[in-house]
Each structure stands twice: as structure tokens, then as C-alpha cells.
Amino acid sequence: MTMVRGLLLALCLGLLMPAQAWAQTHCPRNAPGSVVTPPPDLYSKNGVLKVSMKYFTELDQYNRTLFCFVTDSGDEGPTLHVNPGDQIQISLTDRVPNAPGAGADVLPVTNAYGSTFGGCTGNVMTGSSVNMHFHGMNIPPICHSDQVIYTVINPGETFQYVLNIPKNEPPGLYWYHPHIHGISSPAVQGGATGVIEVEGIANIQPIVAGLPQRYLVVRDGPLQNPAGNSVVNNYLVPYWDISLNYIPIPYPTYPPAIIQMNPGTEEFWRVANTAADTIMDLQLVYDGVAQPVTVVGLDGVPVGSQDGKHQGTTFNETDVFIPPAGRAEFIVNAPSASVKNAVFLTRRIDTGPDGDTDTPRPLATIQLTQAKLNLPLTPVRNGPPNPQRFEDLANAKVTARRKLYFSEALIRSQVPPQDGGKAPPPWGGGVEFFITVDGQNPNVFAPFNPPAITTKVGAVEDWTISNRAEEVHEFHIHQIHFLLLEVNGVPVPKAQQQFYDTYQVGYWTGKGKYPSIKVRMDFRGAIAGDFVYHCHILDHEDAGMMAKIRVMP
């Protein structure tokens, strides 16, 4: 992982003009310990949300590379609010410098395979390229919509996105980020992320109507105080720093952000883990006691809402696990005045012997105040629930069953070690990452690869995804959601089955059965075209752990 990460960062750092002391003008960051403020909000009008964004990069004061999507009015990473059936129009311009020598890094994007559904922009991508993925949205993988394989915007170019939100899109939290293969992790860790809110959740989950709502966006990035990944002065060093709404929480002191709440109130928290690589297990702890929260939505889908009744359910948890790219929406209760220490935190994650180090750390302290907080209220029910995209998938006829697996392999170096060739191969090198259909050969992803899977619109398929690696992987597929049926061969009780677009597959211990999940894939929407599935630990995706699926009309 270290070698792979080093190469990616070297590529991105090399894009910046040499020997420049960059002022932080485009991608501002808040001071550690700041009070959490919401991202800027943009709302659709008359069924259309129109916005112009530019993609910038710069160095921060710690010489880390930042990336950001910024509107013409200077808003960074705004929240896009739309209704089912609305249209989002985004004009995106790439303002990342095309550094001298970047042409040496070009990678072809399309060939005969890409032309089946039409290439979108240029035929090559470089370390300066960008595009946007609208994560979780159930929209077509076609040019000018959510097509990440063949959409490449290069420096100086402007590209138009036109996203038609389905009328049956579940109301909830989605997000957007760059998805250029090979540099998606540095771009996301640089901060180029934001959330999308499909309105109307109170129509499905009336329990949230009228509650103050708070948008919380978690990100990760390179360490502000790098110290190697080990134990230093009794501190376990994380692989990455994290932030909350652009407020840094750096290792080793982890100064938490501040969330202000009015005493005796309930709030509706809408949390997106837009980190590239860091897994979260969120918890509210008041004076050492974990507090229950009421879960309302997961990955943009109101829980328990796809059975045809157009109404959701809720459940209580004392911790909420969110992989990279996952979202969770839940109701929290403010601490009472007698509580002396109220903390919103993430617990330690066991990622496996080959995994990253995700340490326990605070995200924010809860500070009670009598001041008016001016949080927007969740709109009350404004009509009957809209039909739901994944209705009755649990009872649909299964048209195909497939098995896939995650795996890793050392890259065999071409140069023997400096010991007279006594050491056996493989000699050093990095790691290649694969997601493979059972029976096929493992292949590192490239944009011009043929599809590993071909299916048709209307198909309903059961996939079993196992993990042969000694670190966790996070399964994600574009354009659709899936219903979780089994974990490690154990059926999930029907009443507890939920819809996700990203779910973790545990690590293999080196013996016994491979960990696995079984999911039901819903290809019944208007999603004809080529798209991808991959591990959403983006360092793994960048290193090849992605494959292409083709859905025929």
C-alpha cells in the first residue's frame, strides 16, 4: 500500500507548478477546533438546479495537495438539493495546471469497446484530468450523465453534465466526487467532494418532519504530522488524518471540532463518509456512555421502505458503521445539562493484518448553547410518497447468479535484490489489486478493458462476493443499489435486510472459509450502458480493483 500511495501522490504533486508557494485561495480549510458550520446549499427551482463549477488545486501550509469543486460565487463543495424528477445541470471546468511532462502519464480511455456506447470527451487522460461521479444516483451511465469510464475533462476544458433524477429516486443523501482511474484517491483526499440531497424523506419517514437537520461530511487526507505507520510515543499512528466539514482533526492530538446543540432538542444528522480510504464506526458518547441513535436512512435509501408500502421503518443503534462512500441518516438527542463530556467519535477499525490503520479518535465535542442555531428544518410531509426505485426486489425473480472475489498479488520486481540473488522471488515491488468473476483470470482494471460481466436491463441477479485478501474491501457498484441477503453465509433476517450501494467484505485470516456477502442486484432501471464495480477504498481501486459491467438495452 505504501508504494502504491507514494506513486499516486508523486503524480499529483508533480502536477503543481514547481517551487511555488501557493496561497490558499480556492480550497480554504477551517482551523482545528472550529465550530461546525453546514456546507453551502444550492436548491433547484422549477425542477432545475443549474450550477457552474471549477476544479482547482493548490498546496496547503503543510505542503499537501488540495483539490476542490468551487462555484462561480466561491462556494466550495456545496450541497445540491433536488426533488425526485428534477434535473441537475452542471458546467464543470478543469483549472488544474497541465504541468510540463504530464503527457508522459497519458492513458488511453477508449477503443472499440468504448465506442459501443460512444466515447464522451478526449481519448486520453492524464494526471490533470477530472470528471464527476454522482455516487448512489440511479441515473444512466451515458455521456453527460454519470459515465465515469469514458468521460475525461482535461485542463482548460469545460464539460456539461445533465442529470435527470428519476421520479422514483429514494429521498436521501448521495454525493459527488472525481473518478479518474489512477488518481481518484488523491483527488478525493484533496477534498473535492460534496453531497446531494434528494428531498422528500419526511414523506417516507414522517418521524423526521420538522426536526433541525445537520449535514456532516467526513473527509480524510495525508497526515499533517507524518510519523510513519507505527506506534510513536505510545500513539498508534493512523494512515490518514480526517476532517469534519473541512475542520481538520490532525494526529496526534486530534483536536475535535465543536457541534453546538440546544439542550433538550432532537436533531436529524445526515452524515456522509466521503473519505477515500478511512472507515468510520460512529458513536455518540455522553460521560462515557454510548448513546442510541435512531437510524432513518442508509446510502440514500430510507430503511425498510422498499416493500411496496411507500413507508419506512427505523431502528436504534449505539454505533453506526459507515465504510468509505457510505451515508447514514439518524436522529440524535442533545445531552442534558448535567452531562460533562459529550463526544461524537469514530471507533477503532480492525482492517486486517494488511489493512490501513484506522485509529479511534474524536470528530467533535457537543457544546450546549441557548443561542439560536439557525439550522434548517426538515420539510414536513408535502404529499403522498413517490414510488420507490427498488420496490419488491426481495420477491423478484432472480435471472442470474454470479460469484466474484477480491484478491491481491505482489508485483514481481524485474531487478533482484542486492544480495547476490540469494533471496527468492518475488523481489519487492508493490501490490496489484483485483476484483474477479469466478472462472475468469484476475486483471488490473484499465478503461479500455472489455466488460467482465454482460447483462440486460430488467435483470435481477444474486452476486456472492468473497474476499481472499488479508485486509477488508468495500464493495461498491455504480448506477444501482443492492439488497443485502447474507453475510459470511448467514442469512440476514428479512425484516433487517437493507439496501446499500457500498458494503464491507471482511478480511481473510489465512485459513478457513473466505469472508463473503450475498447481495441482490437490481438492473430494472434505465441504466443501459457501461459502468463499473470496485472496492471503494480508493487506493485499492486506483491500483486495479475495479471491473466493467455492460448492461444491454
Image (cartoon, grey):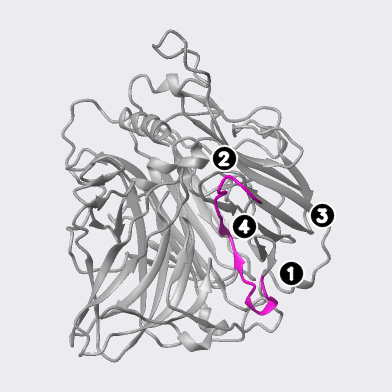
Q: CA distance from mark 2 to mark 3?
A: 23 Å
Q: Earlier in the sequence, mark 2 or mark 4?
A: 4
Q: Is residue 381 magenta?
A: no
In screen coordinates, is 224 left or right of 195? left
Amino acid type shown at disc 4:
Ile
Q: Are marks 2 and 3 in contact (CB under 8 Å)?
A: no
Three-letter residue code for mark 2: Met
Q: Is residue 44 visible?
A: no
Q: Spatial distance from mark 2 to mark 1, Cα to Cα?
A: 28 Å
Residue holding disc 1: 393
The numbered disc on residue 139 is: 4
Please provide percent x and percent y for residue 329.
46, 73
**First to last magenta residue range:** 492-512
Q: Amino acid at mark 3?
A: Ala
Q: Nearer the viewer, mark 2 or mark 4?
A: 2
Q: CA distance from mark 2 to mark 4?
A: 23 Å
**Residue at left offset 47%, top offset 69%:** 328
The answer to whether the residue labelled 2 contacts the one labelled 4, judged by CB atoms less than 8 Å apart, is no
Residue drawn 53% across the image and 19% down it: 425
Residue 501 percent location from the top left of the image: 58, 60
Q: Nearer the viewer, mark 1 or mark 4?
A: 1
Checking the image for residue 479, the label placed there is none
Under mark 1, the amino acid is: Leu
Residue closer to the observer: 203 or 254: 254
Q: Quadrant of residue 269?
A: bottom left
Residue 400 circle label: 3
